[in-house]
Image (cartoon, rainbow, N blue to C red):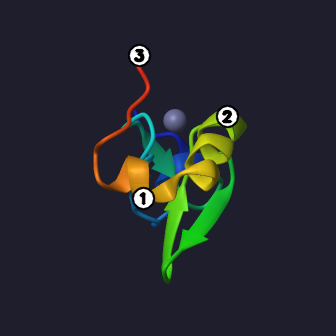
Amino acid sequence: MKIPFLSSNKSEPAIDPVCGMSVDTSNPPGGAATHEGTVYYFCGPGCRVAFEKDPEGYLSGEKSIEM
Ligand SMILES: [Zn+2]
């Protein structure tokens, strides 16, 4: 069974760099942030705020949020 709302959406999911969840890029619950020319999407505002405070830390894998 397909969900029309989702099947009409062709955008690829993105990975939240903070928590590792997949995020719908067409409607990211936490919004998006651009870092060094790359757009990142977030599962929630908390992840975006954390990323914006220390993008390098999350992208390098030095930081992560315990789930
Ligand atoms: Zn997240």
Which residue appears at 68% of the width and 44% of the height? 49
* Label 3 crowd bin: few (<14), some (14–19), many (20+), radius 10 Å: few
Q: What is the three-letter code of the residue carrying label 1?
A: Glu
Which residue appears at 65% of the width and 54% of the height? 27
Q: Is residue 28 visible?
A: no
Mark 1: secondary structure: helix
Q: What is the three-letter code of the residue carrying label 3?
A: Met
Q: Which of marks 2 and 1 is nearer the N terminus?
A: 2
Could you tell me which quadrant the N terminus lies in?
top left
The residue to which callout 1 is attached is: 56
Q: In this view, does 13 lie above or below 30?
A: below
Across and down, in percent, residue 4 comes to: 56, 48
Asked whether disc 2 touches disc 1, contact meaning CB atoms under 8 Å apart, the reply is no
Asked whether disc 1 touches disc 3, contact meaning CB atoms under 8 Å apart, the reply is no
Across and down, in percent, residue 34 comes to: 58, 71
Tell me the CA gap for discs 1 and 3: 20 Å
Q: In which quarter of the image is residue 26?
A: bottom right
Which residue appears at 48% of the width and 79% of the height? 36
Could you tell me which quadrant the C terminus lies in?
top left
* Label 1 crowd bin: few (<14), some (14–19), many (20+), radius 10 Å: few
Q: What is the three-letter code of the residue carrying label 2?
A: Gly
Across and down, in percent, residue 19 comes to: 42, 34
Q: Does the residue labelled 3 lie within 8 Å of ligand 1?
A: no
The residue to which callout 2 is attached is: 46
Which residue is farthest left? 61
Q: Is mark 2 within 8 Å of ligand 1?
A: yes
Q: What numbered label is drawn on residue 67?
A: 3
Q: Which of marks 3 and 2 is nearer the N terminus?
A: 2
Mark 3: secondary structure: loop
Between 43 and 65, the one lying in front of the other is: 65
Q: In this view, does 20 lie above or below 10?
A: above
Mark 2: secondary structure: helix
